[in-house]
Image (spheres, coloured by chain):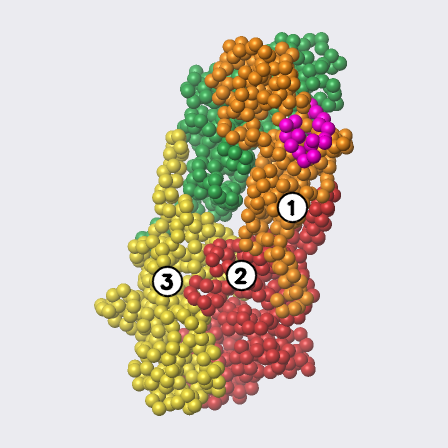
Chain colours: A green, B orange, C red, D yellow
């Protein structure tokens, strides 16, 4: 049976995302206490797949996931899952708003509920927890008065939903990715993404401009670009990017070899279908056929045939 | 007397940074529980200046600071302070390594000490706190066994330094910024930085390439570029950037007006001396004199004089 | 009375163009034997204006005009005139096709009538002349059997039109320019052109790319680009360009100062209305108002006002 | 025996260039009256090779050669020959400067000797001829008083050299090319040139910028760029370019396929050794090995192997 790691304990949004991965119905979900231990469990073979949060439309990228995939033994993303995020305020049965002095949650939850907290619980202190579900567990244990978590976590920890649908920003979403040990990518669908980590040459101020040009020239749209420190010192960054298209596409293949040549290093993190199914726009001149025609023409002129 | 806000309580790295701001010796340092309340205290006039962490060479940017400056009433950065970061393990007197089951700190501290913790305290659980000093305070109160914080925080909370110089990455640094209500920038020094938040046009795939070109064409080096979600939805970003040069420089002025024209919005966050004092390289054609000469030439040809 | 120089003798296309210059009805047209002597006559003040051929849609640019304007005392273009070009075969009365062994014309005329000559006069030899009208004059004198010239030249030289409407390419046109000593340009009409000669830095391989970027970034369309040798050696070029827009436009002004800064030299050759009257497209962000707004914003932030 | 066409009659600079083509000693040189008939003689197989003037460091490109190669049945350049150009004033024995009223030469010769003529023969009239050697022949026949041609033409036409070393610009050179029917290019030498004609998409204002970027991104230096009218109308151009490198180089191959994809049409006109032997500079990341490495890496990640 397939084993899928997720950030536990039971009741996290990550667990919800993990259940949506293909064939999850027949999978065994295995909770891990941190993102890094979940990723390492894939590397060692203890599990087949790990599902980790990658970015949130309000709070931004999840650094621990970006860095965990950018370093260490290679892994590849095989799927993305996007989940609308809104929180419930979970309390022990009988607790009222007036009785809440402490509210616990993962530190990513607080910025998404800040206005609500200011209005409804102006005097409560926020307490960071390892995960939202952990916060709920600690409320059950009596450490805190309330937790912000998915409403679906209430039953698991014998809590009540005192308020639901909490979110400062309408339409907030979190994007999760499923990662595995290196394997051939899922077949191209015409609506795919490729994730990369690009390390510019250190001695090269225009490195990012050069990188963007490699994509732009082949009509490849970038849908995410995050800089991350390489750890060497302030001002030393790598770039985590999502590009529209599949590693098997001609235009993506040529862009990848171009990046490989101009960057100090490129880490390929997989091609996979876009969660929203939106097909890539392919502008004139960059379809697979255009590349094939141009290559055939080049072969002819190299051999001295009339072009 | 000048009042300077910092992320408290007493004993944080931010407090250390705040003491290094110009004229801090005569300033009153005022602790705040969160970055956002510190920034708002500047906006309301409750304090004159706030010092907040902006980025770390290992952990990356501090989203709450970036977002807090990118939105709300305008503020400007007037100085940056870079502090080498290494942690001490603080315990109540008498505690030994073997007796430590929980280690508390700000969530930014954990990734910087992960290897050390794995080797020296493999079974201890990490507990996130609102600040490192808060963690120390909670150790004093008996909630946790140990805190990761600056060694300078030990005395304040009657703790002992069980280990010092803890950092996974040699040379780790945190960069803090001092912000004030809008005011004329400090005089240009030749070694300055300008911080901006750039909002690309939504309907414009090549927006970032265009933005980078505005800088590159005037020989302006970008030393930091962070994307941040605008909150509207996945795939909608703004860019927080640091550019070398001063708002009063001709080349920076023209780049700024160019950005203002091509972006949906530009938020100017101040020009201030670089902490490392490294002078900007000014390539041929972009010195102030080159702009002045070119403008004089344009005036001549517009009036019909021989160029 | 205004004196206008043209490439003579009487009966050239240039003379026809000269009659179309504003106020030409009251002007005295003065023939010159070469383009260079016509230009020099403007420089010395012997005439007020010179009209010279600049480019042809079949034969390309007229090097002597490009070079004559790119060097020597400065002149500016104040108007352009576009004339449809088709040739007549002029002969002494009584000559038939069968009796034509030599056909004279300016060397620019031959390529435009090559197919016609091959079909209709396959055995005739082409003889280059100083101008088409000169060729007609030489036919009158009996030196050659026929001339290719405008039909309007027949009467002047007592010749007959044996064939008319001769042109290999349908719709061929020649563009002439009227030049004067430096003076303020004609008022902007919204459908203007600016002509420049750009000398890239010698030690700079990407010079042309940089030049094009200065235009592209401000949404300025280039409608002509010619390289010309600088005379220093093979591989050393300058570029003669026509850009859409007026020197008084904000976007053109900024592009010009940018070019002045990055080029070794820029020679401004005037702004003037387009002959076809086609208004320039002004994309988002580069209208005069956009520049004015951006400059006002820059002034505010430099003074410390909220942006 | 190899037959080589040149612009005759005997005594032209082109003939001199033709003798310098490889194996010319055993070749039969065949004069043609025009560049176009020489090119067509290669196309029909009447000759094996044609040598034609391509550009001059003072007078610029030779439009008839550019256009003759850009259209019609394909031909390829297999060699270039660069010849220093200075002229002799050829006269019938006994003629003195004072007796010269007419000076004949090809129209490309006059601009290169203009200052000399103005100083030494201010009253002589210039008469254009089909070639410099033709001018000499016509002097022999008594039509003109003097011809500007290579001194080596004097003997052939029984003329005297009245002055030698005539050239307004020190170091003037003319570049000739040897063309053949399509065949595999000469082997790469590391100091090669590739000649192309590029037709941008009509509906695409940034076409030239896009074209230059295809070269720049692969570190390919352009050493010549000429625009030529396509004949369709004013403002419709194609570009004749020389790029450093060989069609067999990886970077040139990828640039060519890129141009083929973005242009409306690309005409390949051959790769051949540079006359000056100056090796191309190959910047980091664009050597053949870099391309091979990148392609091998792409193959690995496409198959799911760790990169």
- Please report the residue visible at 35 percent of the width from the left and 77 percent of the height from the top: D150
Discs 2, 1: same chain: no
> Where is mark 3, residue-wise?
D73
Residue B126 x %, y %: 56, 17
Which quadrant would residue D187 be assigned to in this image?
A: bottom left
- Eyeballing the image, is A166 above or below D106? above
Residue C135 on the magenta span:
no
- Please report the residue visible at 62 percent of the width from the left and 34 percent of the height from the top: B81
Q: Which mark is residue C264?
A: 2
Discs 1, 3: same chain: no
- Please report the residue visible at 60 percent of the width from the left and 83 percent of the height from the top: C30
Discs 2, 3: same chain: no
Figure quadrant of the N terminus of chain D: bottom left
Label 2, label 1: how far apart the Cα atoms are = 29 Å
- Please state which of residues B209 and B254 is positioned toward the viewer in this rendering: B254
Residue D41 x %, y %: 32, 69
- Eyeballing the image, is A161 above or below D236? above
Q: Which mark is residue B188?
A: 1
- Eyeballing the image, is B305 above or below D277? below
Residue A19 x %, y %: 53, 19
**Foreground mark, 2 or 1?**
1
In which chain is the residue bearing label 1?
A: B
B109 sits to left or right of D194: right
- Please report the residue visible at 51 percent of the width from the left and 45 percent of the height from the top: A206
Residue C32 x %, y %: 55, 82
Q: Which residues are magenta?
A: B15-37
In which chain is the residue bearing label 3?
A: D
Local packing at callout 3 (Cα closer than 10 Å; few below 14, some 14-19, many 20+) is some
D15 sits to left or right of A106: left
Which quadrant would residue C234 be assigned to in this image?
A: bottom left
The answer, for residue A292, to whether it is visible in the render is: yes
């Amino acid at each position: 049976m397939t084993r899928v790691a997720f950030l536990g304990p039971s009741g996290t949004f990550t667990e919800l995302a993990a259940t949506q991965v293909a064939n999850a119905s027949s999978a065994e979900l295995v909770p891990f206490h941190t993102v890094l231990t979940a990723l390492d469990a894939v590397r060692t073979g203890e599990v087949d797949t790990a599902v980790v949060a990658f970015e949130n439309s309000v709070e931004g990228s999840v650094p621990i996931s970006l860095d965990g995939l950018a370093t260490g033994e290679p892994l590849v993303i095989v799927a993305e899952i996007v989940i609308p995020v809104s929180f419930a305020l979970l309390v022990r049965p009988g607790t009222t708003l007036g009785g809440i002095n402490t509210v616990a949650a993962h530190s990513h939850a607080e910025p998404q509920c800040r206005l609500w907290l200011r209005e409804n619980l102006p005097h409560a202190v926020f307490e960071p927890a390892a995960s939202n579900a952990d916060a709920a567990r600690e409320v059950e244990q009596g450490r805190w008065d309330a937790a912000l978590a998915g409403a679906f976590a209430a039953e698991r920890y014998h809590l009540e939903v005192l308020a639901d649908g909490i979110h400062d920003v309408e339409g907030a979403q979190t994007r999760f990715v499923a990662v595995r040990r290196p394997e051939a990518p899922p077949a191209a669908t015409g609506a795919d993404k490729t994730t990369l980590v690009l390390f510019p040459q250190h001695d090269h101020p225009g490195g990012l401009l050069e990188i963007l040009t490699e994509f732009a020239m082949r009509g490849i749209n970038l849908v995410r670009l995050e800089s991350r420190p390489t750890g060497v010192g302030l001002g030393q960054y790598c770039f985590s990017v999502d590009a529209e298209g599949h590693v098997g596409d001609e235009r993506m293949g040529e862009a990848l070899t171009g990046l490989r040549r101009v960057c100090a290093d490129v880490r390929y993190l997989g091609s996979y279908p876009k969660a929203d199914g939106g097909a890539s726009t392919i502008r004139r001149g960059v379809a697979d056929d255009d590349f094939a025609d141009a290559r055939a023409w080049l072969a002819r002129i190299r051999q001295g045939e009339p072009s």
